[in-house]
Image (cartoon, grey):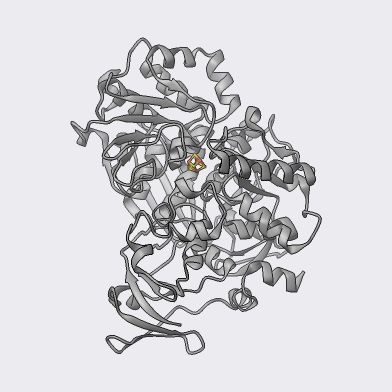
Amino acid sequence: MNGKCWKYGDNVNTDGIIPARYLNTTDVKELASHCMEDIDPEFVKKAGEGDIIVAGDNFGCGSSREHAPISIKAFGISCVIAKSFARIFFRNAINIGLPIFESEDAGAEISDGDEVKVDINSSKITNLTTNKEYSFTPFADEMKDIIQAGGLMEYIKANY
Amino acid sequence: MGMTITEKIISAHSGLQEIRAGQFVYADVDICLGNDITAPIAIEQFERLGIDKIFNPDGVVLVPDHFTPNKDIKSAQNAKLLREFAQKHRIKNYFEVGRVGIEHALLPEKGIVVPGDLVIGADSHTCTYGAMGIFSTGVGSTDLAACYATGKVWLKVPETIKFVFNGKLNKWVSGKDLILYVIGDIGVDGAGYKAMEFSGPVITDLSMDDRLAMCNMAIEAGAKNGIIEPDDCTEKYIKDRAQREYKFYYSDADCEYLGIHEYDVSTLSPQVALPNLPENIRPVEDLSDIKIDQVVIGSCTNGRISDLRIAAKILKNKKIDPSVRLIVIPATQGVYLEALKEGLIEIFINAECVVSTPTCGPCLGGHMGILAEGERALSTTNRNFAGRMGHPKSEIYLCNPAVAAASAITGKITHPEYID
Ligand code: SF4
């Protein structure tokens, strides 16, 4: 994964990622068109396919709405890097196959507009703009199984 | 070494004698809950699996409460999806509009969730039922779909932080104030991924409604679950409601806690959370001249009968300030009927409040009381993120029902003793 970063602060909440006024639909294209709307109304205009969202602590806090990671994934964001993720957002992202990486230093140091590369095999995040390298918290083996299957439903299909 | 109540319930549902915090398990689910926002995605996912049977129709609960009575055509389509899924799979715990209530008030009230259960819900406030000695946690729609198929959920066993409340609560101070105070103390991710276990003499004296309000907001500290060991209060609450057999679990004396927080709450006054995070806590008396446009009394936190009783006590024979709109939302049809019988609804209407049918409504900015740009609400709900109740540039202050009612009378944030 390789992309341009959009940087946000702590406690980015799911109401900001996808406001409740759009929760009357499950259409992924429509959800994508409102991605991050109440955090950054310009986001869908300026960000592009393959870009990366970087944030501080507790990214995705608040509601359990899967519409939040769905809108990010459907918009084409390649992954989210944060200092930490809120619990339900974390499991939703794993379950739907949106790559997310937890890294205290990367979440703190990467700036808006930086070009960043993530290598899952070597567990490395490289900031190509500053030439700095970071590692991210490894996933539990059981979570890797779900990620490798392509999400929880695919995992279930293969294992039940 | 012993186990915490949270570890014990998860272990009993994983077929394992003993489990430890940090362990990864696939646990059996007693009840899984979905609503009109989250269940549609789960149903679509489940149907794509091509399995024709759900794991156990009696373990599935569907509560269309967020945008109902259907606020627009798209919500109506989603509600229809739930209704048809319920019919197809013979799900008895589907609640049509005339029987519905806000999910986290409804499930305890009807005895659908019982002590000792392991409950998941595609709604973050599923942690509410911990008040009854249940392990319950919020998950996403895909988890729900997986549970429809397998009856199981993947979980990492959480570490537990214990919170002990000593002293005696002042008048007008409730479970809501205790949990706001804790969130103010530890922060919105202070219990991230952890279990919060509430105990101490103050909790022993607390009503079930107040305990439910406390565990409801465990998620606002980032917790996986909130939990209270069952006692006489739990027994009294559940014995005539339980739809199934229940079991009381307790933490062992030698169990391991990640940390223990002790509070003496004898001097605590009602707490208010300022925009835009539930951790921005101030005692109500520190706030003066904060004018409000709208007050909401309701939600899965504070829409139960005891909440309405407190509000009515303050509003009796009074009128709210003409510059304020006060929306009262009984959390369930049962609460609504009880409030009607007790004359509370009459008090609200005479005070010039509006009373709504049970719904989440304004709590998530859905309908029934959306804020305009620059407006400020005082609300008994649980989240005050920017724009949650409407326009991105509107504000929400959180409080208990007494503060909400008193403030509606004066038009600005007010300590209830001022009205009393
Ligand atoms: S009342 Fe509010 S917090 Fe509770 S379930 Fe409804 S939307 Fe969620």
Is residue B29 positioned above or below B181 on the image?
A: below
The spot of residue A2 in percent (x, y) is 42, 83
Relative vertical location of residue A129 with respect to residue B39 in this rendering, above or below: below
Residue A68 can be seen in this image: no
Q: Residue furthest left?
A: B289
Question: In the drawing, does residue A71 fall left or right of residue B122?
Answer: left
Instruction: State the count of labels.
Output: 0
Q: Nearer the viewer, residue B11 or B331?
A: B331
Which residue is found at the position 26% from the left and 28% from the top? B414
- On screen, A125 above or below B128? below
Answer with the quarter of the image where residue A142 lies. Answer: bottom right
Q: Is residue B365 above or below residue B158?
A: above
Which part of the image, by quadrant, shows the N terminus of chain B? bottom right
Residue A39 x, y percent position in the rendering: 34, 57
Question: What x and y, as percent, mark residue B206?
Answer: 48, 34
- Left or right: residue B255 versus residue A103 is right
Picture quarter containing residue B69?
Answer: top right
- Residue in view at x 75 percent, y 40 percent: B244
Residue A128 horizontal/vertical position (percent)? 33, 87
Q: Which residue is more in the foreground, B162 or A140?
A: A140
Seen from the viewer's position, the closer of residues B171 and B358 is B358
Is residue A81 or residue B403 the one in the foreground? A81
Instruction: Name the residue: 32% across, 65% down.
Output: A8
Question: Is residue B22 visible in the rendered structure shown here?
Answer: yes
Q: Residue at the spot x=40%, y=17% of the render? A: B313
The quadrant of the image that shows the C terminus of chain B is top left
